Amino acid sequence: MTRGRLEHDHFLRAIYLKRDAVPDFKRYPFAIPAVRSLKSELKLDASVTFFVGDNGSGKSTLVEAIAVAAGFNAEGGSRNFNFHTRRSESDLHTFIQLVRGVRRPRDGYFLRAESFFNVATEVERLGPQVLDSHGGKSLHEQSHGESFLQLATNRFGDNGLYILDEPEAALSPQRQLSLLAIIHRLVSDGTQFVIATHSPILMAYPDAVIYQLGPKGIRRVDYEATEHFQITRDFLNGRDRYFRHLFGSAPDEDEPAGR
């Protein structure tokens, strides 16, 4: 396994917020604590960087801004994709600066779960050559998870920059493990990933950097310190205790069987 790559070996080394240009820290997206707390460089000093946090913590907003600032279409695709269905991206990308490494990526892709349908439609519209580069089979004619893995398997290559927003939304736990294998193969060939996720499976990738976003801002954490790991572990080890807390009693304590 490729471990301990030099910081300057990454395509993106860090980002920072151009705070002097921000018009108002009380309005979206600058009011998000994770954004408002960016007062120095946020290092992207690993081949795989995860942004994790609760709904509304700003992880997708931040990953989207990184992708658009890096030249990707806001709804997804490669840098050659230039389409839009409904503009929903924030203007955060115009207020962040990317610190780039000495290498330049050979290829790249921005893939977000919420607009994957739009990307699949654009792939078909662009014709056979683009469809072939995405695996040759219509992404619409497969399940969400199958089409996602087809794209990752066939379209992602070595020495690339790939930015993913909640890829687990399309994937079963088994398929998340398959994605981890794809990520590992590509990392070994010089690729860099920046990923927003809720998945404790994906964020377990060895040597990844994990940033936790929350009400107190953004901080770098170990895998075992993430809320996702802790809640998943505690639930699996004691789900009856969770049920008593959530429902007032375990689900079978007061109800006759079969009801």
Image: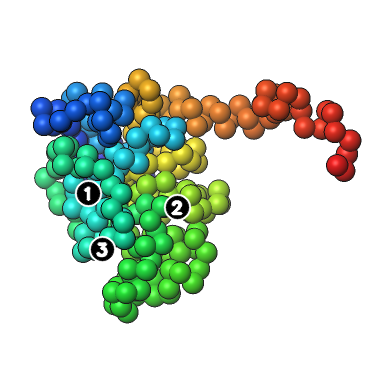
- Tell me the kind of residue under disc 2: Leu
Residue at x-position 43% and y-position 68%: 139
Measuring from the top left, give residue 178's x and y in whole percent: 48, 54
Q: Residue at x 19, y 49 (%)?
A: 70
Near mark 2 (Cα within 10 A), the count class, few <14, some 14-19 or many ≥20, is many
- The residue to which callout 3 is attached is 83
Label 2: which secondary element: helix
Which residue type does callout 3 highlight?
A: Phe
Tell me what residue is drawn at x 27 percent, y 34 percent.
Answer: 29
Instruction: Say which of marks 2 and 3 sits in front.
Output: 3
Distance Cα–Cα, label 1 vs label 3: 13 Å
- Please identify the quadrant where the N terminus is shown: top left
**Residue lying at 23% horizontally and 54% vertically, measured from the top left:** 72
Q: Whole-Å distance between the Cαs marked 2 and 3?
A: 27 Å
Q: Is residue 145 above or below residue 2?
A: below
Q: Is residue 12 above or below residue 250?
A: below
Identify the residue position indicated by label 1 in the image. Answer: 68
Where residue 115 appears, as percent x and y from the top left, is 38, 56
From where the camera sits, is residue 183 visible?
Answer: yes
